[in-house]
Amino acid sequence: MTTSKIGIVGAGVISKIYGTNLSGYPEVELAAVADLDLDRAKARAAEFGVAKACSVDELLADPEIDIVVNLTIPKAHASVSMDALRAGKHVYVEKPLAVTREEGKAMLELAREQGLRLASAPETFLGGGIQTCRKLIDDGAIGTPIHASGFMICGGHESWHPDPEFYYEVGGGPLFDMGPYYLTAFVTLLGPIRRITGTAVISYPERTITSEKKRGKTIQVETPTHIAGVLDFAGGAVGTLITSFDAPSGTSLPNIEVLGSKGTLLVPDPNHFGGVVKLRRAGSPEWEEVPLTHGHTDNNRGIGVVDMARAIAEGRQHRANGDMAFHVLEAMHGFHDASRDGRHYEMASSCERPAPMPTLDRERK
Protein backbone atom coordinates (compact mmCIF):
# COMPACT_ATOMS: atom_id res chain seq x y z
CA MET A 1 0.00 0.00 0.00
CA THR A 2 1.25 3.47 -0.96
CA THR A 3 1.33 5.94 1.92
CA SER A 4 1.12 9.68 1.22
CA LYS A 5 2.91 11.98 3.64
CA ILE A 6 0.74 14.87 4.79
CA GLY A 7 1.79 18.35 5.88
CA ILE A 8 -0.81 20.53 7.60
CA VAL A 9 -0.54 24.30 7.17
CA GLY A 10 -2.57 26.13 9.81
CA ALA A 11 -2.62 24.79 13.37
CA GLY A 12 -5.88 26.42 14.42
CA VAL A 13 -9.00 24.85 15.90
CA ILE A 14 -10.01 22.79 12.87
CA SER A 15 -6.57 21.16 12.61
CA LYS A 16 -7.39 19.11 15.70
CA ILE A 17 -10.11 17.03 14.02
CA TYR A 18 -8.03 16.64 10.85
CA GLY A 19 -5.05 15.44 12.88
CA THR A 20 -7.20 13.05 14.90
CA ASN A 21 -8.84 11.49 11.87
CA LEU A 22 -5.85 11.36 9.53
CA SER A 23 -3.96 9.40 12.16
CA GLY A 24 -6.42 6.54 11.68
CA TYR A 25 -5.77 5.71 8.00
CA PRO A 26 -2.82 3.67 6.70
CA GLU A 27 -2.97 5.45 3.32
CA VAL A 28 -1.72 8.69 4.87
CA GLU A 29 0.91 9.72 7.40
CA LEU A 30 0.81 13.08 9.16
CA ALA A 31 4.44 14.14 8.84
CA ALA A 32 4.58 17.88 9.57
CA VAL A 33 2.60 20.80 10.97
CA ALA A 34 3.29 24.43 10.07
CA ASP A 35 1.86 27.73 11.26
CA LEU A 36 2.81 31.40 11.32
CA ASP A 37 2.89 30.90 15.09
CA LEU A 38 5.61 28.28 15.54
CA ASP A 39 4.63 27.60 19.15
CA ARG A 40 1.12 26.72 18.01
CA ALA A 41 2.53 24.39 15.36
CA LYS A 42 4.73 22.72 17.96
CA ALA A 43 1.80 22.21 20.32
CA ARG A 44 -0.38 20.63 17.64
CA ALA A 45 2.46 18.45 16.36
CA ALA A 46 3.18 17.22 19.90
CA GLU A 47 -0.48 16.41 20.38
CA PHE A 48 -0.38 13.98 17.45
CA GLY A 49 3.15 12.67 17.89
CA VAL A 50 4.42 14.42 14.78
CA ALA A 51 8.15 15.04 14.86
CA LYS A 52 8.23 18.07 12.58
CA ALA A 53 6.77 21.46 13.52
CA CYS A 54 8.04 24.24 11.29
CA SER A 55 7.44 27.36 9.23
CA VAL A 56 5.28 27.20 6.13
CA ASP A 57 8.29 27.73 3.88
CA GLU A 58 10.13 24.86 5.54
CA LEU A 59 7.18 22.53 5.14
CA LEU A 60 6.81 23.39 1.43
CA ALA A 61 10.53 22.82 0.87
CA ASP A 62 10.40 19.34 2.41
CA PRO A 63 10.69 16.81 -0.46
CA GLU A 64 9.00 14.10 1.61
CA ILE A 65 5.66 15.93 1.88
CA ASP A 66 3.26 14.68 -0.79
CA ILE A 67 0.02 16.46 0.13
CA VAL A 68 -0.42 19.85 1.77
CA VAL A 69 -3.63 20.24 3.78
CA ASN A 70 -4.29 23.99 3.80
CA LEU A 71 -6.30 24.97 6.88
CA THR A 72 -5.58 28.69 6.82
CA ILE A 73 -8.25 31.42 6.85
CA PRO A 74 -10.15 31.92 3.55
CA LYS A 75 -8.24 34.98 2.34
CA ALA A 76 -4.99 32.96 2.57
CA HIS A 77 -6.33 29.87 0.78
CA ALA A 78 -5.17 30.88 -2.69
CA SER A 79 -1.69 32.14 -1.83
CA VAL A 80 -0.78 29.16 0.36
CA SER A 81 -2.24 26.67 -2.12
CA MET A 82 -0.44 28.27 -5.07
CA ASP A 83 2.87 28.18 -3.19
CA ALA A 84 2.29 24.50 -2.38
CA LEU A 85 1.50 23.67 -6.00
CA ARG A 86 4.62 25.50 -7.16
CA ALA A 87 6.56 23.40 -4.65
CA GLY A 88 5.26 20.24 -6.35
CA LYS A 89 2.71 19.26 -3.69
CA HIS A 90 -0.83 18.03 -4.14
CA VAL A 91 -3.22 20.34 -2.26
CA TYR A 92 -6.33 19.84 -0.18
CA VAL A 93 -7.71 23.19 0.99
CA GLU A 94 -10.48 24.02 3.43
CA LYS A 95 -13.59 25.69 2.03
CA PRO A 96 -14.06 27.85 0.10
CA LEU A 97 -11.54 26.97 -2.60
CA ALA A 98 -10.56 30.65 -2.81
CA VAL A 99 -12.11 34.06 -2.20
CA THR A 100 -12.32 35.16 -5.85
CA ARG A 101 -13.07 33.35 -9.09
CA GLU A 102 -9.81 34.61 -10.53
CA GLU A 103 -7.85 33.00 -7.69
CA GLY A 104 -9.77 29.74 -8.03
CA LYS A 105 -9.20 29.58 -11.77
CA ALA A 106 -5.49 30.26 -11.33
CA MET A 107 -5.25 27.43 -8.79
CA LEU A 108 -6.94 24.98 -11.20
CA GLU A 109 -4.71 26.03 -14.09
CA LEU A 110 -1.52 25.72 -12.05
CA ALA A 111 -2.50 22.28 -10.73
CA ARG A 112 -3.10 21.08 -14.30
CA GLU A 113 0.19 22.58 -15.53
CA GLN A 114 2.06 20.87 -12.71
CA GLY A 115 0.24 17.55 -13.08
CA LEU A 116 -0.92 17.79 -9.47
CA ARG A 117 -4.18 17.17 -7.62
CA LEU A 118 -6.25 20.01 -6.20
CA ALA A 119 -9.05 19.20 -3.76
CA SER A 120 -11.25 21.24 -1.48
CA ALA A 121 -13.61 20.90 1.43
CA PRO A 122 -16.37 20.42 2.21
CA GLU A 123 -16.10 16.65 2.25
CA THR A 124 -19.26 16.08 4.27
CA PHE A 125 -20.99 14.95 1.07
CA LEU A 126 -18.88 11.77 1.35
CA GLY A 127 -20.69 10.88 4.58
CA GLY A 128 -23.47 8.37 5.06
CA GLY A 129 -26.26 10.96 5.18
CA ILE A 130 -25.85 12.56 1.77
CA GLN A 131 -24.52 9.38 0.16
CA THR A 132 -27.69 7.53 1.23
CA CYS A 133 -29.77 10.32 -0.34
CA ARG A 134 -27.66 10.14 -3.51
CA LYS A 135 -28.34 6.41 -3.76
CA LEU A 136 -32.09 6.91 -3.23
CA ILE A 137 -32.21 9.47 -6.04
CA ASP A 138 -30.06 7.33 -8.35
CA ASP A 139 -32.25 4.30 -7.62
CA GLY A 140 -35.39 6.24 -8.57
CA ALA A 141 -36.98 6.38 -5.11
CA ILE A 142 -38.38 9.87 -5.74
CA GLY A 143 -38.72 9.56 -9.51
CA THR A 144 -37.55 12.54 -11.54
CA PRO A 145 -36.09 15.27 -9.30
CA ILE A 146 -38.09 18.47 -9.69
CA HIS A 147 -36.84 20.86 -7.02
CA ALA A 148 -34.26 21.10 -4.25
CA SER A 149 -34.45 23.64 -1.45
CA GLY A 150 -31.84 24.49 1.16
CA PHE A 151 -32.02 26.67 4.27
CA MET A 152 -29.12 27.80 6.45
CA ILE A 153 -30.54 30.43 8.77
CA CYS A 154 -29.07 31.68 12.05
CA GLY A 155 -28.16 34.85 13.90
CA GLY A 156 -24.49 35.07 13.03
CA HIS A 157 -21.30 34.10 14.84
CA GLU A 158 -20.54 37.16 16.97
CA SER A 159 -22.46 35.64 19.88
CA TRP A 160 -20.11 32.66 20.28
CA HIS A 161 -17.01 32.86 18.07
CA PRO A 162 -13.93 34.36 19.80
CA ASP A 163 -12.77 36.09 16.57
CA PRO A 164 -15.87 36.60 14.39
CA GLU A 165 -14.66 39.58 12.34
CA PHE A 166 -13.67 37.62 9.22
CA TYR A 167 -17.21 36.26 8.87
CA TYR A 168 -18.29 39.79 7.92
CA GLU A 169 -15.41 40.62 5.59
CA VAL A 170 -15.35 40.10 1.83
CA GLY A 171 -15.12 36.34 1.33
CA GLY A 172 -17.19 35.74 4.46
CA GLY A 173 -20.90 35.95 5.12
CA PRO A 174 -23.31 33.02 5.38
CA LEU A 175 -22.98 32.12 1.71
CA PHE A 176 -19.21 31.74 1.69
CA ASP A 177 -19.17 30.25 5.20
CA MET A 178 -21.94 27.66 4.86
CA GLY A 179 -22.96 27.81 1.21
CA PRO A 180 -20.23 25.37 0.12
CA TYR A 181 -21.87 22.60 2.20
CA TYR A 182 -25.27 23.16 0.62
CA LEU A 183 -24.13 23.77 -2.94
CA THR A 184 -21.76 20.79 -2.88
CA ALA A 185 -24.64 18.64 -1.63
CA PHE A 186 -26.86 20.01 -4.42
CA VAL A 187 -24.25 19.16 -7.08
CA THR A 188 -23.71 15.69 -5.58
CA LEU A 189 -27.44 14.97 -5.62
CA LEU A 190 -28.54 16.73 -8.83
CA GLY A 191 -25.48 17.60 -10.88
CA PRO A 192 -24.03 20.92 -12.08
CA ILE A 193 -25.77 24.30 -12.12
CA ARG A 194 -26.68 26.10 -15.36
CA ARG A 195 -27.73 29.55 -14.16
CA ILE A 196 -28.48 31.50 -10.99
CA THR A 197 -30.41 34.52 -9.80
CA GLY A 198 -31.11 35.97 -6.38
CA THR A 199 -31.06 38.80 -3.90
CA ALA A 200 -28.24 39.54 -1.45
CA VAL A 201 -28.49 42.20 1.26
CA ILE A 202 -26.73 43.50 4.36
CA SER A 203 -29.56 43.65 6.91
CA TYR A 204 -27.44 45.11 9.73
CA PRO A 205 -24.49 47.26 8.59
CA GLU A 206 -22.90 47.05 12.04
CA ARG A 207 -22.61 44.13 14.46
CA THR A 208 -21.62 44.07 18.13
CA ILE A 209 -19.59 41.14 19.43
CA THR A 210 -21.15 39.52 22.50
CA SER A 211 -18.73 36.60 22.92
CA GLU A 212 -16.39 37.09 25.87
CA LYS A 213 -13.03 37.58 24.24
CA LYS A 214 -14.04 40.75 22.36
CA ARG A 215 -17.37 41.61 23.97
CA GLY A 216 -18.59 45.08 22.99
CA LYS A 217 -16.39 45.50 19.92
CA THR A 218 -18.30 46.59 16.81
CA ILE A 219 -17.88 45.09 13.35
CA GLN A 220 -18.54 46.98 10.13
CA VAL A 221 -20.21 44.49 7.78
CA GLU A 222 -18.62 44.34 4.32
CA THR A 223 -20.47 41.42 2.71
CA PRO A 224 -24.13 40.38 2.29
CA THR A 225 -25.54 38.55 5.30
CA HIS A 226 -28.89 37.43 3.86
CA ILE A 227 -28.96 35.77 0.44
CA ALA A 228 -32.04 34.27 -1.25
CA GLY A 229 -31.21 32.49 -4.48
CA VAL A 230 -32.74 30.44 -7.28
CA LEU A 231 -30.79 27.86 -9.27
CA ASP A 232 -31.48 26.10 -12.55
CA PHE A 233 -29.64 22.77 -12.76
CA ALA A 234 -28.29 21.54 -16.07
CA GLY A 235 -30.33 18.36 -15.64
CA GLY A 236 -33.62 20.27 -15.52
CA ALA A 237 -34.40 20.55 -11.81
CA VAL A 238 -34.81 23.91 -10.07
CA GLY A 239 -33.37 24.87 -6.68
CA THR A 240 -33.72 27.51 -4.00
CA LEU A 241 -31.15 28.39 -1.36
CA ILE A 242 -31.43 30.80 1.56
CA THR A 243 -28.39 31.52 3.71
CA SER A 244 -28.62 34.07 6.49
CA PHE A 245 -26.81 35.44 9.53
CA ASP A 246 -29.74 37.78 10.19
CA ALA A 247 -32.35 35.66 12.01
CA PRO A 248 -31.31 34.96 15.62
CA SER A 249 -34.45 32.91 16.28
CA GLY A 250 -33.52 30.46 13.53
CA THR A 251 -36.07 28.55 11.43
CA SER A 252 -38.23 25.43 11.39
CA LEU A 253 -37.48 24.82 7.71
CA PRO A 254 -35.56 21.66 6.69
CA ASN A 255 -31.86 21.74 5.91
CA ILE A 256 -32.41 20.33 2.42
CA GLU A 257 -35.54 18.92 0.80
CA VAL A 258 -35.70 17.34 -2.65
CA LEU A 259 -39.04 17.04 -4.43
CA GLY A 260 -39.51 14.40 -7.11
CA SER A 261 -42.23 13.04 -9.37
CA LYS A 262 -42.71 10.00 -7.11
CA GLY A 263 -41.66 11.21 -3.67
CA THR A 264 -40.00 13.78 -1.42
CA LEU A 265 -36.66 13.35 0.33
CA LEU A 266 -35.49 15.07 3.50
CA VAL A 267 -31.70 15.38 3.41
CA PRO A 268 -29.78 15.79 6.69
CA ASP A 269 -27.65 18.80 7.57
CA PRO A 270 -24.89 18.98 4.93
CA ASN A 271 -22.52 20.39 7.54
CA HIS A 272 -22.45 16.91 9.10
CA PHE A 273 -21.59 13.46 7.80
CA GLY A 274 -24.50 11.43 9.14
CA GLY A 275 -28.01 12.40 10.17
CA VAL A 276 -31.55 11.19 9.62
CA VAL A 277 -32.82 10.55 6.09
CA LYS A 278 -36.59 10.59 5.56
CA LEU A 279 -38.63 9.67 2.49
CA ARG A 280 -42.28 10.19 1.73
CA ARG A 281 -43.52 8.34 -1.31
CA ALA A 282 -46.31 9.70 -3.52
CA GLY A 283 -49.69 8.67 -2.12
CA SER A 284 -48.35 7.95 1.37
CA PRO A 285 -49.39 10.20 4.28
CA GLU A 286 -46.36 9.18 6.35
CA TRP A 287 -42.65 9.85 6.29
CA GLU A 288 -40.42 6.78 6.57
CA GLU A 289 -36.93 6.91 8.04
CA VAL A 290 -34.46 5.28 5.68
CA PRO A 291 -31.53 3.36 7.23
CA LEU A 292 -28.19 4.77 6.11
CA THR A 293 -26.62 2.69 3.35
CA HIS A 294 -23.16 4.25 3.67
CA GLY A 295 -20.59 4.71 6.41
CA HIS A 296 -18.59 7.74 7.59
CA THR A 297 -21.33 9.14 9.79
CA ASP A 298 -19.27 10.74 12.57
CA ASN A 299 -17.13 13.86 12.27
CA ASN A 300 -14.97 12.36 9.54
CA ARG A 301 -13.18 15.51 8.38
CA GLY A 302 -10.08 14.30 6.63
CA ILE A 303 -11.80 11.60 4.58
CA GLY A 304 -11.52 13.86 1.53
CA VAL A 305 -7.74 13.90 1.98
CA VAL A 306 -7.72 10.12 2.32
CA ASP A 307 -9.90 9.73 -0.79
CA MET A 308 -7.46 11.91 -2.74
CA ALA A 309 -4.50 9.83 -1.54
CA ARG A 310 -6.33 6.67 -2.59
CA ALA A 311 -7.27 8.21 -5.93
CA ILE A 312 -3.65 9.12 -6.66
CA ALA A 313 -2.61 5.52 -5.97
CA GLU A 314 -5.52 4.10 -8.01
CA GLY A 315 -5.25 6.53 -10.93
CA ARG A 316 -8.84 7.80 -10.67
CA GLN A 317 -10.49 11.16 -10.03
CA HIS A 318 -10.76 12.15 -6.40
CA ARG A 319 -14.26 13.05 -5.28
CA ALA A 320 -13.78 16.43 -3.56
CA ASN A 321 -12.06 17.69 -6.68
CA GLY A 322 -11.08 21.20 -7.66
CA ASP A 323 -13.47 21.40 -10.61
CA MET A 324 -16.49 20.91 -8.35
CA ALA A 325 -15.08 23.30 -5.75
CA PHE A 326 -14.57 25.97 -8.40
CA HIS A 327 -18.11 25.41 -9.74
CA VAL A 328 -19.42 26.00 -6.21
CA LEU A 329 -17.20 29.09 -5.81
CA GLU A 330 -18.50 30.52 -9.09
CA ALA A 331 -22.09 29.82 -8.04
CA MET A 332 -21.63 31.75 -4.79
CA HIS A 333 -20.30 34.76 -6.67
CA GLY A 334 -23.12 34.29 -9.15
CA PHE A 335 -25.73 34.95 -6.47
CA HIS A 336 -24.00 38.21 -5.53
CA ASP A 337 -23.59 39.23 -9.19
CA ALA A 338 -27.22 38.46 -10.03
CA SER A 339 -28.44 40.54 -7.10
CA ARG A 340 -26.18 43.46 -7.96
CA ASP A 341 -27.02 43.44 -11.68
CA GLY A 342 -30.70 42.45 -11.48
CA ARG A 343 -30.39 39.51 -13.88
CA HIS A 344 -29.71 35.81 -14.21
CA TYR A 345 -26.06 34.81 -13.96
CA GLU A 346 -25.06 32.18 -16.53
CA MET A 347 -22.51 29.75 -15.14
CA ALA A 348 -19.26 29.58 -17.12
CA SER A 349 -18.00 26.42 -15.40
CA SER A 350 -19.39 22.94 -15.02
CA CYS A 351 -18.32 19.71 -13.36
CA GLU A 352 -19.18 16.05 -13.09
CA ARG A 353 -21.16 14.63 -10.20
CA PRO A 354 -18.54 12.95 -8.02
CA ALA A 355 -18.58 9.17 -8.03
CA PRO A 356 -20.68 7.66 -5.22
CA MET A 357 -18.95 6.23 -2.19
CA PRO A 358 -19.04 2.45 -1.61
CA THR A 359 -22.07 1.26 0.32
CA LEU A 360 -21.68 -0.44 3.69
CA ASP A 361 -22.30 -3.80 2.02
CA ARG A 362 -19.47 -3.23 -0.42
CA GLU A 363 -17.14 -2.01 2.32
CA ARG A 364 -17.75 -5.21 4.31
CA LYS A 365 -16.78 -7.31 1.31
Image (tube, grey):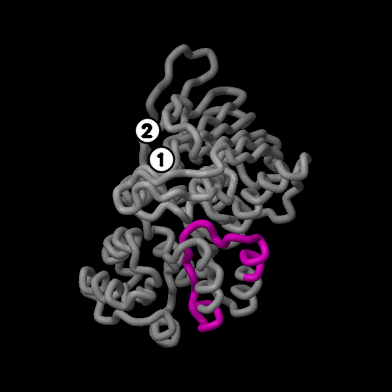
SS label for mark 1: helix
Question: In the rendering, which numbered label is found on residue 276?
Answer: 2
**Do residues under tags 1 and 2 come within 8 Å of each other at their CB atoms?**
yes
- Tell me which segment is drawn in magenta: 84-106
Q: Estimate the x, y position of residue 317 in percent, counting from the top left.
A: 54, 63
Dividing the picture into quadrants, the one containing residue 238 is: top right
Specify few, some or many for label 1: CA neighbours under 10 Å numbering under 14, 14-19, or 20 or more: many
Q: Is residue 210 above or below residue 307?
A: above
Read off the residue under disc 1. Answer: 129
Q: Is residue 165 above or below residue 248?
A: below
SS label for mark 2: loop
Front-lying residue, 289 or 17: 17
Residue 87 highlighted magenta (yes or no)? yes
| Quadrant (top left/top right/bottom left/bottom right) for the N terminus | bottom left
Would you say residue 3 is visible in this rendering? Answer: no
Q: Estimate the x, y position of residue 42 in percent, counting from the top left.
A: 26, 76
Q: Residue at x 46, y 65 (%)?
A: 308
The earlier-in-sequence mark between 1 and 2 is: 1
Would you say residue 208 is visible in this rendering? Answer: yes
Number of on-image labels: 2
Q: Estimate the x, y position of residue 275 in percent, counting from the top left.
A: 36, 37
The kind of residue on which mark 1 rests is Gly
Dividing the picture into quadrants, the one containing residue 138 is: top right
Quote the CA–CA distance across marks 1 and 2: 7 Å
Front-lying residue, 166 or 85: 166
Front-lying residue, 126 or 335: 335
The kind of residue on which mark 2 rests is Val
Left or right of 232: which side holds 256? left
Q: Estimate the x, y position of residue 144 in percent, counting from the top left.
A: 63, 30
Q: Is residue 147 above or below residue 39?
A: above
